[in-house]
Image (tube, helix red, strand yellow):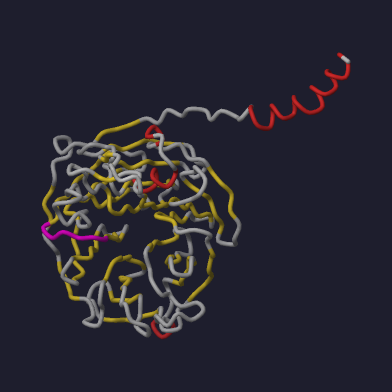
C-alpha cells in the first residue's frame, strides 16, 4: 500500500505541483533614475519662426509627423469620402497631396490615432488605424503623383488597440497598451507574428489589473538614435523610461512634477479608478533622433485645463541626461522635429502648423 502511494505521488501529485504551484518568480529590476528640474535647465523661450494654416477642408487635425521635407497631418473628418491624411510642403505649407480616403473600403485609412517614422536607411511612415486594427507603412519619399494611391509598402494586422507603438530600424515593433496579459510591451515584426516581452516599468505596485495599469500609464513611444534606443513616455505622468532594443532598461527620467499618476478608487463599483483634481497630463509625445530625445510636456491639470496641449519641450541625450528645456509661445498638441536642422513643427489648436527653431 505504501509503495502504491509513492507511485501515486510521483506520478500525479508531484507533476501537478510543478505545473500549478511553482510559478517562476520575476526578477526585480532596479531602474536607475535621473530627475529634471527647471532650476537645472532654465527654460529658453521660443517664438514661432513661421506658421501657416492647414487646408480649410480639414475637420479635426490630431497628429503631425515631419519626414523628407514634408509635414503629414492626420484628420478625423467624420464623413465618408474625405481624406484622413494630408501631405504639406514643410516650408511653405502648400498642399502636396492626400491619402486615406474614408470610404471603409479594404486598405483605406478610416481613422489615424498613432503616427510614427520607422528609422533606418529607408524611412517609412507608419500609421495605425484602430477601426481596422492595421498598421500601414507608407513610402515617405513617394513622388507627389503617387500620394493619392497611398504609396503603401506593407500592412500589419494587430489583435488589439495599442496606446503606443515604437518602430525599430530592423523591422521590430514595440506595442504597449490594453493587452489581456500583464505585459507592458509586446514585440511584433513587420512580417507578422508576435512574441511577448516583459519590460520592467513602473506601476505594478498599484496592484491593479493590466488594463487599469495601462490606462494610468498611457504610453507614447518612439525608437531611433545611434545607437538605437526606445523611449516610453507616460501621458499622465512626468516620466520617460529608456530601454535598449533588447529590453534592458537604461534609465527612468522623472520630470518636474509628481512622477506618478494621481488617482483614487471611486465609490462607483463599475469603475476601477478615476483621476483626482490634482492629476496632470505629462508627456504627450516623444521622438528619438540620432543624438537626442525630444518630448512634448504638458504639466496642465487634467480637469481644469486643456491638457492635451503643451508649451514645454524637454530635450535629453540618448543616455537620458537633460540638455535643454524650451518654453513655446504657442501651445501645441503634436510635435515632430527635423533632426538635421533642429526645427520643430507643432500642431496648434487653431488649425495651424507652427515651426520653432530649437537648435542653433
- The location of residue 28, given as percent across then percent down, is 48, 27
- The location of residue 299, given as percent across then percent down, is 19, 47
Residue 348, placed above or below residue 45 = below
Q: Quadrant of the N terminus?
A: top right
Is 124 left or right of 325, judged from the image as shown? right
Majority secondary structure in the magenta region: strand
- The location of residue 331, given as percent across then percent down, is 16, 59
Front-lying residue, 108 or 34: 108
- Residue 332 lies within the magenta run: yes
Which stretch is magenta? 329-334
Residue 317, placed above or below residue 88 = above
Q: Quadrant of the C terminus?
A: bottom left
Residue 217 appears in the picture as rendered? no
Q: How many marks?
A: 0
Front-lying residue, 134 or 172: 134
Residue 324 appears in the picture as rendered? yes
- Residue 15 lies within the magenta run: no
- The location of residue 211, given as percent across then percent down, is 42, 47
Is 19 left or right of 82, judged from the image as shown? right
Q: Quadrant of residue 13?
A: top right
Front-lying residue, 195 or 21: 21
Q: Quadrant of residue 210?
A: top left
Q: Residue at x 23, y 60 (%)?
A: 333
Q: Residue at x 18, y 76 (%)?
A: 53
Residue 109, placed above or below residue 122 = below
Q: Residue at x 40, y 82 (%)?
A: 101
Q: Residue furthest top?
A: 2
Q: Residue at x 38, y 71 (%)?
A: 111
Amino acid at each position: 500500500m505504501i509503495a502504491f502511494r509513492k507511485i501515486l505521488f510521483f506520478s500525479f501529485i508531484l507533476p501537478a505541483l510543478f505545473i500549478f504551484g511553482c510559478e517562476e518568480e520575476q526578477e526585480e529590476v532596479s531602474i536607475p533614475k535621473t530627475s529634471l528640474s527647471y532650476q537645472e535647465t532654465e527654460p529658453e523661450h521660443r517664438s514661432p519662426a513661421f506658421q501657416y494654416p492647414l487646408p480649410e477642408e480639414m475637420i479635426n487635425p490630431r497628429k503631425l509627423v515631419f519626414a523628407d521635407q514634408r509635414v503629414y497631418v492626420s484628420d478625423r473628418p467624420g464623413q465618408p469620402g474625405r481624406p484622413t491624411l494630408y501631405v504639406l510642403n514643410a516650408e511653405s505649407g502648400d498642399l502636396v497631396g492626400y491619402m486615406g480616403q474614408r470610404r471603409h473600403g479594404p486598405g483605406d485609412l478610416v481613422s489615424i490615432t498613432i503616427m510614427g517614422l520607422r528609422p533606418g536607411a529607408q524611412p517609412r511612415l507608419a500609421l495605425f488605424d484602430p477601426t481596422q486594427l492595421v498598421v500601414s507603412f507608407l513610402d515617405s519619399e513617394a513622388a507627389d503623383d503617387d500620394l493619392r494611391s497611398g504609396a503603401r509598402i506593407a500592412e500589419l494586422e494587430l489583435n488589439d488597440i495599442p496606446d503606443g507603438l515604437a518602430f525599430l530600424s530592423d523591422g521590430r515593433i514595440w506595442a504597449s497598451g490594453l493587452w489581456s496579459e500583464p505585459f507592458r510591451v509586446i514585440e511584433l515584426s513587420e512580417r507578422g507574428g508576435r512574441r511577448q516581452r516583459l519590460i520592467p516599468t513602473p506601476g505594478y505596485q498599484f496592484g491593479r489589473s493590466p488594463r487599469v495599469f495601462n490606462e494610468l500609464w498611457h504610453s507614447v513611444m518612439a525608437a531611433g538614435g545611434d545607437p538605437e534606443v526606445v523611449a516610453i513616455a507616460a501621458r499622465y505622468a512626468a516620466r520617460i523610461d529608456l530601454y535598449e532594443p533588447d529590453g534592458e532598461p537604461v534609465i527612468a527620467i522623472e520630470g518636474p512634477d509628481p512622477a506618478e499618476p494621481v488617482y483614487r478608487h471611486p465609490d462607483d463599483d463599475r469603475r476601477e479608478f478615476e483621476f483626482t483634481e490634482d492629476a496632470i497630463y505629462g508627456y504627450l509625445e516623444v521622438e528619438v533622433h540620432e543624438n537626442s530625445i525630444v518630448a512634448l510636456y504638458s504639466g496642465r491639470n487634467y480637469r481644469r485645463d486643456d491638457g492635451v496641449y503643451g508649451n514645454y519641450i524637454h530635450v535629453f541625450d540618448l543616455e537620458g541626461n537633460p540638455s535643454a528645456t524650451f518654453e513655446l509661445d504657442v501651445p501645441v498638441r503634436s510635435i515632430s522635429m527635423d533632426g538635421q536642422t533642429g526645427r520643430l513643427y507643432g500642431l496648434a489648436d487653431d488649425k495651424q502648423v507652427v515651426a520653432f527653431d530649437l537648435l542653433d
